[in-house]
Amino acid sequence: LRGAWSAGFRAPSLSQANYSAVATAFIADSTGTEVPTEVGLFRVDSDVARALGSQPLRPERSINLSAGLAFSPVERLTLTADYFRIRVRDRIILSGELSGDTIAALVRPYGASQARYFFNALRTLTEGVDVEAELRAPVRAGTVTLTGAFNWTSNVVDGPIENPPVLEGFQEQIFGHQARVRLERERPRTTTKIMARWQTARLAVGARATRYGEVIAAGDVPEWDQRLSPKAILDVDLE
C-alpha cells in the first residue's frame, strides 16, 4: 500500500503578470465619428484592467492526494492501482473578450472599449485512476512482457467563477462555454494501452496499441460542439 499528501503553489508567470497586446481600432462613437480606441489584452496592473476590478495576481495553490497498491497474485504477474486527486484554487485564467455598454463605460476614460486580462478566477478539481497489469514469461532464450494499462482522468471547474464585483453578471464573458469545454473535455478522459515486447540479449521487438477516448471541440454555443469519437493507434519497434 502507498499514499501521499502534499500542498503546492505556482507563482504567476512573467507573461501572465506583464504581457500585453494592444491594437488600435477605429470605432464609431454616438455621433458616428470614428474614434481611435484601444482593444486587446491589458496588463493586470494597467488602468484599464483596474477599472474592471483587477487585483494583483496571487499564486495558484493546490492540495494533492494519492493512494494506491501493488501486489503479485502469482509469480511474474504484477498488478497496480492508483487514485489521485488534485484541488487547485486561485487558478489563473485569461478572461474572454469583455465588451458591451457597461464595459465600455468603465474603460472609455482610458481610451479603450474592450479588454481582456489575467486574474485568479477558478477552483478546479482533477481526479483519476491508473490501473496496470504486467506479466513476464520466459520464451525461447528471451523474455516476453505483456502489459495492459488504463487511465481515467476528470478535470472540472469546482465552484462558481470568482469574478470581481464590478464584473458581476459577466461570468459568461469571463469564462464562457468554449473556455469551460476546453478545460474539461478537450483532452480524452480515458486512455487504454496494450503492450507486448519480446527481448533477447541481441534483439527486442515490441508493439503498443493505444486507444484515446472521446473529446469535444467547443463551438460558440453548445449546439455547435463537435464530439470526436475515440481513436486508436498502433506502434511497432525493433531494436
Image (cartoon, helix red, strand yellow):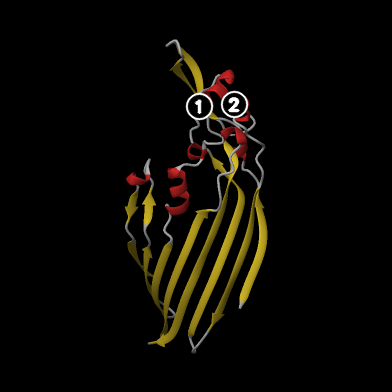
| Residue 119 seen from this side | yes
Q: Tell me: residue 144, above or below residue 94.
A: below
Decide if residue 142 is on the left or right side of residue 169.
left
- Expressed as whole percent of the image width and height from the top left, the position of residue 107 reads 56, 23
**Residue closest to the far bottom:** 74
| Residue 141 seen from this side | no
Residue 143 numbered tag: none
- As measured in the structure, the alpha-carbon distance from the residue carrying label 1 to the one carrying label 2 is 9 Å
- Expressed as whole percent of the image width and height from the top left, the position of residue 65 reads 62, 65
Q: Tell me: residue 71, above or below residue 120.
A: below
Q: Tell me: residue 13, above or below residue 196.
A: above
**Residue at image point 48% right, 62% down:** 153
Q: Residues within 10 Å of mark 2 (few under 14, many from 20)?
A: many
Q: Tell me: residue 193, above or below residue 176.
A: below
**Residue at image point 44% right, 72% down:** 149
Amino acid carrying mark 2 in the image:
Val
Q: State the image quarter where residue 34 is shown.
A: top left
Return the residue at label 2: 48
Pointers 1 and 2 in contact (C-beta within 8 Å):
no
Decide if residue 238 is on the left or right side of residue 105.
left
Classify mark 1: helix, strand or loop.
Answer: loop
Decide if residue 233 is on the left or right side of residue 19.
left
**Residue at image point 37% right, 46% down:** 222
Q: Which of 200 and 195 is in front in this view?
A: 195
Q: Which of marks 1 and 2 is nearer the N terminus?
A: 2
Amino acid carrying mark 1 in the image:
Gln
Residue 114 numbered tag: 1
